[in-house]
Amino acid sequence: MSKLQHPSEGEEFRVRYPFVKEPFEAFGEDGPYTVQTWRPGVSVESADYGDVDIWAESEGEMVLTVVSVHKPGRFPTRVFYTRQFVNPDGATFGKGRLLCCTLEKFRRISTRYQLGYATDETFEEAAERRRAVMA
């Protein structure tokens, strides 16, 4: 999608997206237990002298699928879309509910994650690990 084009209905956008591992507490037959799961987004930690460190443990993808594009009268063009995530292990998740935003915001979110962040694992290394898990 160029700056002047509107996304078309059914078009899919795959965006590199950061993930962090977090503990998830569940309850089973043997009582409560904790497992590590992937959460989309970054972690923010305080650093020296008021700075913050923004980091991710790995990268996956955010998948945006355009449902419809509308221009309501004199108001900005709206994009209706669904969003799902593919975690670094290759599992797809997300509610797939209908979301709406202006065309300008959709252009921003469909190109990259909005914050700069550091990661120890490159996108290519994450993709290789996904292929190994899926095999």
Image (cartoon, rainbow, N blue to C red):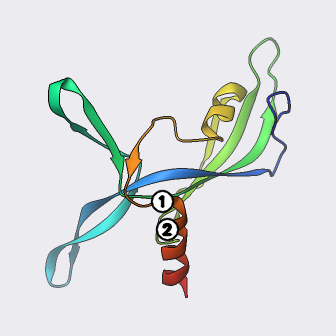
Q: Is residue 75 above or below residue 128?
A: above
The residue at which mark 1 appears reads as 122
> Is 38 on the left-hand or right-hand side of 46?
right
Query: Looking at the image, which residue is at 63% across and 29% down?
Result: 105
Disc assigned to residue 13: none
Image coordinates for residue 35, horizontal then vertical, percent: 25, 72
- Badge 2 density bin: few <14, some 14–19, many ≥20, Cα 10 Å: some
> Is 75 on the left-hand or right-hand side of 4?
left
The residue at which mark 2 appears reads as 125
Amino acid at pointer 2: Glu
Element type at mark 2:
helix
Q: Which of 107 and 79 is in front in this view?
A: 107
Query: Looking at the image, which residue is at 52% across and 60% down?
Result: 123
> Is 35 on the left-hand or right-hand side of 133?
left
Q: Is residue 79 above or below residue 71?
A: below
Residues under numbered marks 2 and 1 in contact, where contact means CB atoms less than 8 Å apart: yes
